[in-house]
Image (cartoon, rainbow, N blue to C red):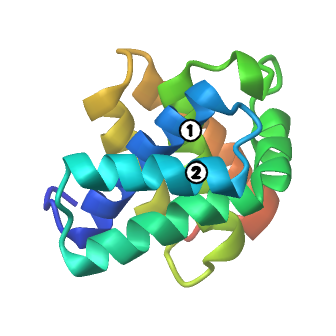
Amino acid sequence: MGTHGPRRMAREAALQVLFAADHSHPDLDVEAVRAAFEEVCAEFKLPGRAHARALELSVGVARNRKEIDLEIGRASEHWKVERLAAVDRAVLRIATFELLYEPTTPTEVVIDEAVEIARRFAGEKSPAFVNGVLDVVARQVRGAREPGA
């Protein structure tokens, strides 16, 4: 997935939105997320499909934050979600949203994209951490990984 197609752009924009909203409103209410989305979109011009998808991801995470955080908390045994690095938390929330609510997106794609985004925006240990947590989340919410994974 080396391409920077609309779906990757949407995930990266959603990361920026959630990061900004989380900073000012840690409970991530939908209105705060929509406001952050407007700010991010004023700075970055997203193509139509990426724009719509970024909003869908951002609002989807905000609406389902409690369930998403519960899954992340279960998967990262020793870490409380609110204590995670903000970028890691946003990446994990987006991917967990996709794993929970978007069964048509293959597990491998969700995890690979999240790891790539963590590699680009987060700390040096983040890609491995994100991969490990999402592996567990995927098993919890989708069952066994696809063969050959």
Q: Residues within 10 Å of mark 2 (few under 14, many from 20)?
A: many
Task: Please provide percent x and percent y for residue 141.
Answer: 78, 63
Task: Please provide percent x and percent y for residue 45.
Answer: 17, 59
* Residue to which mark 1 is pinned: 21
Name the image quarter holding residue 62: bottom right
Residue at 41% from the left image edge and 30% from the top image edge: 127
Task: Please provide percent x and percent y for residue 119.
Answer: 31, 31
Q: Is residue 45 left or right of residue 138?
A: left
- Of residues 117 and 37, the one drawn nearer to the viewer in this rendering: 37
* Residue 139 in the image: above or below residue 119: below
Q: Earlier in the sequence, mark 1 or mark 2?
A: 1
- Whether residues under marks 1 and 2 lie with C-beta atoms below 8 angstroms apart, the answer is yes
Marking on residue 33:
2
Q: Is residue 61 left or right of residue 75?
A: left
Name the image quarter holding residue 60: bottom right
- Which corner quadrant holds the N terminus? bottom left
